[in-house]
Amino acid sequence: MAGHGEDAGLFGRAGECAHLDELIAAVRTGQSRVLVLRGAPGVGKSALLGYAERAAAGARVLRAVGVESEMELAFAAVHQLCAPLLDRLGNLPDPQREALETVFGLRAGAPPERFLVALAVLGLLADASEEGPLLCVVDDAQWLDRSSAQVLGFVGRRLLAESVALLFGTRRPAQDLLGLPELEVTGLRDADAHALLDSVTGIRLDRSVRDRFVAETHGNPLALLELSRGLPATHVPGGFELPHAGALPGRIEQSFLDRIRDLPERTRLLLLIAAAEPTGRPALVRDAAERLGIAPAAALADGTDGLLEFGAQVVFRHPLVRSAVYGSAHQRDRRAVHLALAEATDAEADPDRRAWHLASAATMPDEAVAAELERSAGRAQARGGMAAAAAFLRRAVTLSVDASRCADRAVAAADACLRSGDLDAARALADIADQNAASESQRVRALLVRGHTTFAAGFNNEAPPLLLEAARRLEPFDMDLARETYLIAWGSASYGAANRESLVAISQAIRELPPPAGSPGVFDLVLDGYAALVTDDRSTALPVLRRAVDALTGAPLDDLLKWSWAANGLVALVWEDRLLTRTPARVLEEVRAAGALAELPVYLHALGIPVSLSGEFAAAAELVAESEAVAAATGVPMTQHTGLLLTALQGREAESTALIAAAIEEAGAGGQLAGVATAQWATSILCNGLAHYERALAAAQATIRSANALVSQWALPELVEAAARAGDGTAAREALEELADTAEPCDTDWAQGILARCRALLTGDDAAAGLYLEAIERLGRTVLRPELARAHLLYGEWLRRNRRRSEARTQLRRAYELFTSIGMAAFAERARRELLAAGENVRRRGKEAAASGGLTPQERQIALLVRDGLSNPEVAARLFVSPRTVEWHLRQVFAKLGISSRKQLPGVLPRDESGSAPPG
């Protein structure tokens, strides 16, 4: 029967095997292929993976298997897969090599970013494939540890031209593998199922009995084999007492259980040891067995009925056998087995697996074991395995004896769950910490985690008061942490009219804080400046904000990385246009170098917004493309804030409208008012360009209601223009008064130029001309070309309406030229229509584009980076692909552009074709 089992997995699988043959053939020609085989237990996934291994004869094969009991060990499956390649680590760039060495425990160091680890694994596989095709087989992917699943999902999305095949077998779709090519492996067709059943029963079955068997097993090969096993001939012909399939995995497991029960007790106990020991190391199983008084040779003397193979590795016939053995064992036996395995496990070489066995052996709370788990959590966190750290800490909480230690561990576990994205678990653990807290310090730290968790779930009305309370209660214990919490509370309350009361309370509390010891740093100045914006007026806050801007230049990089989300808006708040990109560009380079893909979109957005406002649309588009590459690499869709603004400024109505609608729906559903505000601001810009002033007015008003101080500041000029053009003088004057409060105290060309332009819109006499000319002069000294072009446009429109047609044509022509050179199509069309009305015939034209040879967005992005002097490895690191993929894309670029060398790229893609390169 065992022999039948091996053959049965491929019975009737000619189509699936042909698919795998094509996949292997493609890899032999230098292409990459990824495939997820998904299907029920026993349907034949493992057999198909085995077939792929045989079909790939001559290729190097790497294997990993997900094990349910190892799901808490960070990077366990990645280590399985990459262990044979560790001698190639030296071929990787230093940051990637160091990341892998850290997570594999080969070196001590700071926890690496998980996507830097993923990029390193991609590079390692690509490097190995240089010597020949590589087949990576990952079975039971439903049991991959989270860190490995994220890494392998990333690798699967970025493979292209590396001669690597990556095959997964899984029972159910895995979140981190979503989006990868998938082949569902279903039951056999009826004819094949009937043939398989006939081949294994040894007797002739009635047609009705066969039909019932096939129907109830859904053609599952393993079910057909197991459920037909040993049926008495007297039961089969008429179908009497034929066992029902029920829940199929359960029935198959029950079949295995029946076979297990027939084994001698010592053999069953040996199977239990093997089931509890996921690495399959015979020596470890043998050692544990001997500690329980079992001689493995004697236990195996009568065989295991084909359920277990005890050779170079200890391997179960099927994962359901392992779960049947473990699940059916008495709790007393399981604890004894785990204790024996803990004693047999080397405490120096494998302390984490030993700690997990000790935890599984515990019959009651055990402080010593809880402490071991706590140390394991620290090691997991040091390797970057936050989900694993959370699992160790959660188990430590349940085994804690002392309530105070339990509270401390629960807070740490809640924080680890928060940082690994398990918000529900974080909230539950914060409650446990609060219930067990023995001091006010512990209670307030539990409250702090709950506040952070609520904040992470969205900018909603619950987070600000929680964080405010936590900050106040932290003051007696940790003033530095209290100040940090106040700033986070301020940020959480800064969006939305509903949070205004909380924002005022938070700002007042900040203003009442004692001054920090020593000279205030960037963080202190940001905190005090933001609070003053609310409690006082702009003129009071401005000196503090300016000092903060000055301090940014020399601020330590660690401070910028930690607080850049708060500091990025400072420059705009004081209207310093020439400093807009400096800090975001500096921080972005560091985030890129660290491989922090999860955080990278935030920093790309922080730079992309000012780059777009400066009219450097090609540079902004490159930042958008990089953000999209991050989304593709991580499999996590992201709201493209820069893309929203860019398409609105460009006037691409259909694309912009679709992006805006999607962003409002996505951000609104998640309570993310920042996303809603940005989308409404982009709508106001788009509609002002299209001369849809009523819609622009409504969008700008919605922005002001939901936005924070910075986005409101940017939306106010849109509101003034839209209201003035829509004939709503009241709304226009109110917006102008608010804008004046914001801009008047700032003696910069940006602030005074925008204010003069908006005042001119509401000035009904000849004084408007002087204001327009002042706006043009001032904005002409800034880097904000779109604002200058709009000043020319509004002045030209005013001149035409005042019958000064010749002067109007001069201004409108200049506006049209600026808009077309920047790429602002909607505003350019508005200027063109005004020119026609002023008596000048002008044809529609767009910005002259360089001949790009039909490059795809990714090809163009690679070409521009290479043109700017980046090497293939540098481009690969920037775009999260392998150098070999960059090389493959460059061959396509050269062919399309008719060149043969990277040195020729500046000639066919001149820098002035794309504007300036993106800062950073």
Image: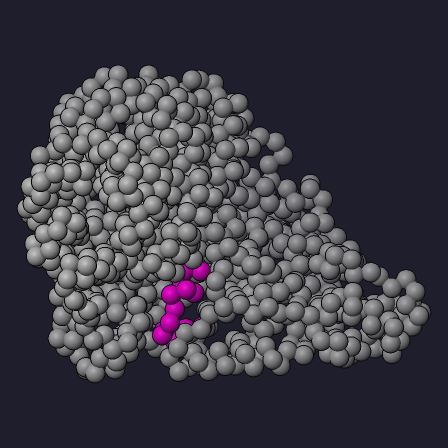
Question: Residue drawn 54% across and 48% down?
Answer: 344
Location of residue 887 (image quadrant)? bottom left
Left or right of 711, for residue 782: left
Above or below, comparing residue 352 to residue 66 in the picture: above
**For this rendering, which residue is in front, 630 or 677?**
677
**For this rendering, which residue is in front, 607 or 513?**
607
- Residue 525 percent location from the top left of the image: 19, 28
Q: Within the magenta stretch, is there residue 157?
A: yes
Left or right of 4, for residue 14: left
Q: What span is colored magenta in the figure?
A: 153-165
- Residue 600 percent location from the top left of the image: 30, 51
Location of residue 271 (image quadrant)? bottom right
Question: Residue drawn 56% across and 33% down?
Answer: 398
Question: Residue drawn 42% across and 52% down?
Answer: 662
Left or right of 773, for residue 284: right
Q: Quadrant of the N terminus?
A: bottom right
Of all residues, the one furthest to the front in this rendering is 803
- Residue 183 percent location from the top left of the image: 56, 70
